[in-house]
Image (cartoon, coloured by chain):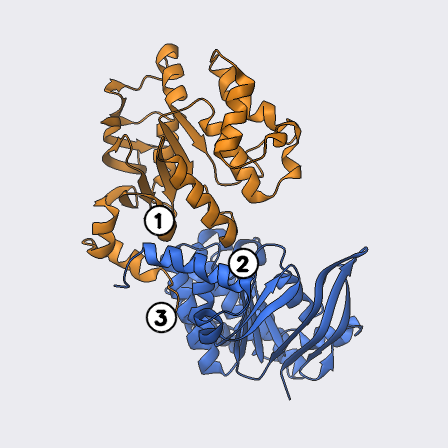
Chain colours: A blue, B orange
Amino acid sequence: MSLLRIENLTIRTGGQALVKDMSLVIEPGARVGLIGESGSGKSLTALAAIGLLPPGLKPEGSILLDGVQVIGAPEEKLKALRGRTAAFVFQEPLTALDPLMKIGRQVAEPIARRHRRDGRSAGRQEIVAEVRHYLERVALPDIDRIMNAYPFQISGGQRQRVAIAMALACRPKLLIADEPTTALDVTTQAEILELLSTLVREEGMALLFISHDLPVVAKVAEEVTVLRRGQVVEQGPVRSVFGSPQHEYTKMLVDAAAAFDRALGAQQ
Amino acid sequence: MTLISVDSVAFGYSRKEPVLHDVSFTVKKGVNLGLVGESGSGKSTILKLLLGLERPSSGVIRFEGQPMNLNDREFMRRYRRAVQAVFQDPYSSLDPRQKVEAIIAEPLRALKIPGDHRAAIEQALADVGLPVDAISRYPHEFSGGQRQRIALARAIVARPQLVLADEAVSALDLSTRIRIVDLLKDLSKAITILLVSHDLGVVAALCEEIIILEKGRIVEAGRTEDILARPQHPYTRKLLASVPRMPA
């Protein structure tokens, strides 16, 4: 069974379709990139996949997440899916984290939630040990200090590592990352991309990686879907879509990315 | 010919924590210069100093050999006519309540430049590839890329010698970004561009010379081609290695 099967998804607001007839399949353990420019509907598609569309946006079609129909599902059913099946990492870790809560407590929340979900209560010691484990998993230094710090007291890259740790702590089957490195410096971006690739492989999770940046997607994804104005223009393995794009729009994107790439000269 | 020389400039908001240490470089007429660095590198601070929004704590900035003096109104008028700016976000850098004509005319009015303003505005619009009927419309009627063209038209309408571009293409989509870089390249036949950016690819595509900044210090500077081919400083190497590349 596919982990995520989106079929003929259309998302409307008023009379306007923001996503049109979109289909996308993610198998367990697959790493899929979703590429598009602003207004392409890439973030809406990801939000729809876990039933988080803002009110006023109506999805039609079918979204099967781990076999459960998301469209039209009651909130209780969706809550059970979030975390257990899919977890989200957002673009801006400063707004994704609670500014008034110390990092240690924030990471403890999804851990405690998972234990409750599994029907067992975990003691404080056990949860703290797990918090440390996940902060170690995302290669954060000086864990004692970070657990006691507020989000504003650590760097942007460290905040994104914390956000990733919180997503991992849910032990999801699918990790959805929406432009997780766009707000970061380029050297930090390289570290986070490396971390995400390693974690996804080691934990056996599937990855839906959303980005406007072609080379970034090439770093982490095996398959790619290109969206333009809410419609899929091309889908396939990264190598073939980037290597020999078929659609005019994909060609234009690949040519533009290659032009900046060429300007940098041969890779060191 | 040297347009601007920055000579041993340091800057800090407090004495304890300087954000720029002993920075020296020159901007030469006709040679596009890229200032590259990550957050905290001091690139925006250098831009603020060049815009005359802050004064160096020590060191001197010279324009055509004359030390920059924010109190000398005559000098500053001449400086602002020669040095204009374009910013990152074309949604916040254009006044939403002004028509494009008034937006582009701003430098002509503020600098009290004589002559036919309407003709100058129409020429600037043509130079940035916008239709002449854009003149009577408002910013909200344009896309992000078109807005950046309007901001560029405003920057070049007074025919400056240098345009300071602060991450001027970073907020744009890839397909738009490449067109605006092409436009900047085209404009730089007549006007020198100093591009402040974190994006090495854009700087490589546009600038003949490059300065790499780390924590308020210049770690490497020279011809872009040479530095990309043979980076000397470990930080430059790390920066270059971090840029994700298209699969071969």
- Where does the image place residue A49, in percent across and percent down from the top left? 67, 71
Quadrant that contains the N terminus of chain B: top left
Q: Nearer the viewer, residue A251 or B39?
A: A251
Q: Is residue A203 above or below residue A182?
A: below
- Where does the image place residue A118, in percent across and percent down from the top left? 65, 83
The residue lying at 52 percent from left, 64 percent from top is A250
Q: Regarding mark 3 in the picture, which secondary structure is present there? A: loop
Q: Quadrant of residue A173?
A: bottom right
Q: Nearer the viewer, residue B124 or B201?
A: B124
Mark 1 surroundings: few (<14), some (14-19) or many (≥20) residues within 10 A: some
Q: Distance from label 3 to label 2 (Cα)?
A: 28 Å
Circle 2 is placed at which residue position?
Answer: A91
Residue A148 seen in render: no
Q: Quadrant of residue A111?
A: bottom right
Residue type, mark 3 in image: Ala
- Where does the image place residue A84, in percent across and percent down from the top left? 63, 78
Residue B248, numbered label: 3
Chain of residue at mark 2: A
Q: Distance from label 3 to label 1 (Cα)?
A: 19 Å
Mark 3 surroundings: few (<14), some (14-19) or many (≥20) residues within 10 A: few
Circle 1 is placed at which residue position?
Answer: B205
Q: Regarding mark 1 in the picture, which secondary structure is present there? A: helix
The answer to whether the residues at label 3 and label 1 have Cβ atoms under 8 Å apart is: no
Chain of residue at mark 1: B
The answer to whether the residues at label 1 and label 2 have Cβ atoms under 8 Å apart is: no
Residue type, mark 2 in image: Gln
Q: Regarding mark 2 in the picture, which secondary structure is present there? A: loop
Q: Nearer the viewer, residue A242 or A32?
A: A242
The residue lying at 60 percent from left, 43 percent from top is B143
